[in-house]
Image (cartoon, rainbow, N blue to C red):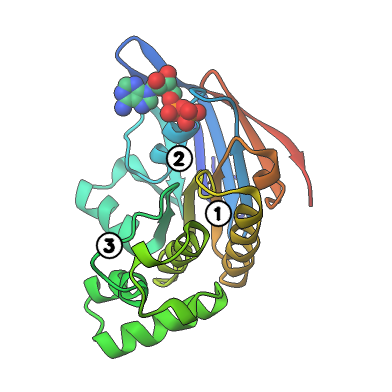
Amino acid sequence: MTPAGSLLHADGLHKAYGPTPALDGASFSIHAGEVVAVMGPSGSGKSTLLHCLAGIVRPDSGTITYNGRELSAMSDSERSSLRRSEFGFVFQFGQLVPELTCTENVALPLRLNGLKRKEAERRALEWMDRLEVADLGHKRPGEVSGGQGQRVAVARSLVTGPRVLFADEPTGALDSLNGERVMELFTQAARSANAAVVLVTHEPRVAAYSDREVVVRDGRSRDLEHAV
Ligand code: ADP
């Protein structure tokens, strides 16, 4: 059963890579607009949980329900269309396209969805403005700082209006001052868009921006606290 109001819900997830269990009965639940930090030591199964929730990795057993639909019941093309239209991703290293300007990078998901260049770039600049990087529009990723690049990557993840954002150590490559600014703007922007954020981190300072923390240990998860 999916708990009432839950947008994305997972129960009893198991996943093994050969003899190594990565997930051993993990569960997870998130509401629209909620920011949940997934914490735990290295190798505990955090990234595997995130990849299962995002429909990138198929668990060996267990259920994942998004908006009332079970991911395992969807075809591969339905799942990838879901990822394109409803999910957004932010990684540790922004993974911006180096040949494109920052504006073109943010506009790219909209261009791939068939939007005309002018409209795509107008929307891109709106999000870049919220992430305070609109003035970097004409620069290429190689010409901006790590923190600025991550804010561009966050703008790109939000431009399509996703319902769920998956962030895997989004500030892992930044110093603490830049990391905190990125988290502040990231969570502010996600909340204003009512997007749920699944935030994988091992840094308590980063997790402090969440509403709730889930700890993963040896492939099993448990709720730590409701901070808000
Ligand atoms: P975390 O994100 O908490 O560091 P992971 O989910 O990356 O943990 O990994 C959990 C366990 O699964 C680890 O033992 C890791 O070595 C193993 N693992 C993860 N991904 C793979 C993979 N693609 N192939 C083999 N083993 C993997």
Q: Indicate yes or no: mark 1 CB to ligand 1 under 8 Å.
A: no
Q: Residue at x 58, y 25 (%)?
A: 41
Q: CB of residue at label 3: within 8 Å of ligand 1?
A: no
**Can you tell me which quadrant of the image ligand 1 is in?**
top left
Name the amino acid, label 2. Leu
Residue at the (27%, 59%) spot, across then down: 81
Label drawn at residue 50: 2
- Distance Cα–Cα, label 2 vs label 3: 26 Å
Q: How crowded is mark 3: few (under 14 residues within 10 Å), some or many (20 or more)?
A: few
* Residue toward you, 157 or 36: 157
Q: Residue 10 carries which label?
A: none
Mark 1: secondary structure? strand
Residue 33: image location, x then y, percent: 61, 61
**Residue 152 or 60: which is nearer the viewer?**
152
**Does any atom of ligand 1 lie closer than 8 Å to the CB of label 2?**
yes
The residue where tag 1 is placed is 197
Task: Residue type at mark 3: give it.
Answer: Pro
| Mark 1 and mark 2: Cα distance apart in space | 11 Å
Q: Mark 3 points at which residue?
A: 98
Residue drawn at x 44%, y 82% is 125
Q: Is residue 13 visible?
A: no
Please identify, in this view, whether the residue under mark 1 or under mark 3 is nearer the observer. Answer: 3
Task: Give whichever of discs 2 and 3 has the lower sequence position.
Answer: 2
> Between residues 100 and 214, which one lies in front from this camera angle?
100
In the displayed structure, 198 sits above or below 191; it is above
Task: Work out how far the residue at label 1 is from the one at label 3, CA to CA, in angstroms.
Answer: 26 Å
